[in-house]
Amino acid sequence: MLPRRWDELKMASSNRDTVVTRVPTSGRTALATARNYVFGDQLGVALFLGTLSVFVFTWRIGVFITDTHTLVHTLPAVANGHLSFGATGPNGLGTPGVHAVDGKLYGRNYGQLVATVPFYWAITALSTVVDLRIGILVGWSLLTIGFGHYLGEALGRRSVTLAGAVAGLTLFVVNLSLGPMPLSTDQIPVLSLQAATLLSTAMTSTLVYRLCSAMTTRTTGVVGGTLTVLATAVGFWAAIPKRHTFTTMLVMGIVFAFYRSRHPDSAPLSPLTYRAVAYALVGLTTWVHAAEGFILFAGLVVVDLATAEQRDARTLATIGGVFAVSLLPMLLTNFLIAGSPFQPPRLLPPYLGGEQTVSHSQGSSRTGIGGTSDESTITLPTSTAFKFLDIVLLDGIRLVLHDPGRLVPVYVRSGYISGIAGNDLKQALNLTVLESTPILGATISLIGGGIRRWGTRSQGLLSRLSPTDWLVGTYWVLFTTLYLPKLPLHAQLTVRYLLPVYALGVYVVLRQAAIRRTLTSHIRAFTWAYACTVLLGGQVLVVVLVVLRLSRGEAFQLHALLGLTAAAVLASSAVGASLDERLRAPTAIALGFAAGLGTSFVFLSALSYFQYGTYALPLARELASLLALG
């Protein structure tokens, strides 16, 4: 049944920034104050808990991609105060991401690992007092109850709160009766990594919600936060501990902090504080991946200095000091491992097993299906940042200018590429951005808006862009040029190197006036189209898969063709809606259909297409057994 209080939600959203970021009065508890600083309001908390609840349900406990073994082996060492570790990959072989220095083995992505350490400690402590299987069941039930509680408060409906409580308790009993799969303490590292990744995904959803709510209305914010995790590739990687999920969260944190620095009305912090937070998040990103941190800094500093009202020496010194401090963890880690603060671990000789290493000139190593290593393409020369800029960014720019066709297998159509499918079990398992996330076809409405303004005396498109728009566009271009020279690549599945682009793309879609007006006037049409596509269309997809006995690669390509079709329909409809308001209703339906296809792909991938590890919840295990491809 559709929500009955959309109108109340839209009325509440008329205050925009005030509603989303209000600071609690003195009568509220410190916990409520902290909650509003982090999540914005009750809907932000509900979205966070709802995202966790959904993806804990589809959570498989296990290693999906080979190079995750590196993080699994490094995490216990980091938790015990060491940077090196003694274990290697399966069967004693090296895994992508393991590096050797003076006879010691090191991992990478230490920023991600340090962020995971509290989860490792907590789960280890929990395992001493309770069976982890029961702990997960209780935790999921509490998430469901909490989601219902905060959603009920936000909508002002006690029945929603009660429904959440009943659902949480009922699902706990059902899962318990089905019999949880056994878990050993050896699985604590991968459990911790996946739990931290799930939290990052949920936080990304909340950040998109807060950004879109502050920018427009709470309704738009809810749609944005929900679509980011349910209808884009962000949801595909929700429980897979790759760095890209962390980077996506940090990127959206930077964009949100930057937006607040330009819109200080009713904000709980000063514009300078928000600017400093943005730079601090950039510094922390370098601890996860130095090259990505560099391009985030380059984009932020250019847009920030070009649009900031305050550029005095004191302001710049404050921001520079915060940024310098945020770089210390990365610099110290590099120094302790490589002896140089400017040489990240991923530039060290890869470890192949035994006494074998490979020099940088020999390229990267790959072990096992699904493992990739990017040292050979993305390097960070310590001699000069200008050389780095030339190698990493200008290579991508030159490639776009001289061979723009390279963008097609990344953004539009991939299909079967023999050189890549050979490493993916001879199957076409890699989807492009539009194939996996057709809602991004709505970005084409920019063209319609430009045409409409071209025929009037209104300002041109570029002059109407806000500083945040410039930052989002800059980050989109920088991530594309950073990774384009090595794409397409095997084991990408959804072009995971560009995962932040998906969240940024949702912002771009909802930034279009035509899309916002469409959602405002036809929210029910959008909701019905989305629900029917997921619930009915998903069943049709399952029947087709079973009847035709499609392989995993064939199933992926079916999603690809459907996704491209939906993206094309949405693109043309969105352009039309920007020119003629009578096309808003069809656009709402097209947007719901495209979003539903994205959600179907996310859930079928989690429950049907891949078999690895064990499901955290028995209910999901039983459902997956019915949907698994033969």
Image (cartoon, helix red, strand yellow):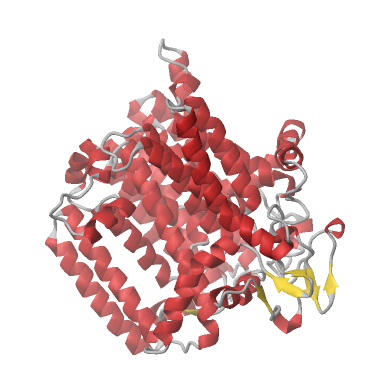
Q: Is residue 414 above or below residue 95?
A: above
Q: Position of residue 299 (x, y in %)?
A: 57, 37
Q: Quadrant of the C terminus?
A: bottom right
Q: Position of residue 416 (x, y in %)?
A: 71, 55
The residue lying at 22 percent from left, 43 percent from top is 19
Image coordinates for residue 170, horizontal then vertical, percent = 25, 79
* 87 in relation to 432, above or below: below
Task: Please name whichever residue, 354 or 529, is drawn nearer the observer in this view of the structure.
Answer: 354
In which quadrant of the rendered view does residue 556 lie? bottom right
Query: Which corner quadrant of the image does residue 67 belong to?
Result: bottom right
Q: Is residue 389 left or right of residue 266?
A: right
- In this rendering, does residue 441 appear at all? no
Q: Camera-side residue: 577 or 370?
A: 370
Residue at left 45%, top 71%? 118
Task: From this view, report whether residue 358 is shown above or below residue 132.
Answer: above
- For the residue pair 47 and 357, the one nearer the viewer reads as 357
234 with respect to 256 (left or right): right
Total labels drawn: 0
**Horizontal side, residue 350 vs residue 263: left or right:** right
Residue 102 visible in the snapshot: yes
> Which quarter shows the N terminus?
bottom left
Residue name at image x 72 percent, y 43 percent = 392
At 79% from the left and 57% from the top, the residue drawn is 419
Q: Position of residue 263 (x, y in %)?
A: 34, 33
Q: Pick whichever, 41 or 529, lies toward us.
A: 41
Rendering quarter of residue 347: bottom right
Q: Is residue 393 left or right of residue 150?
A: right
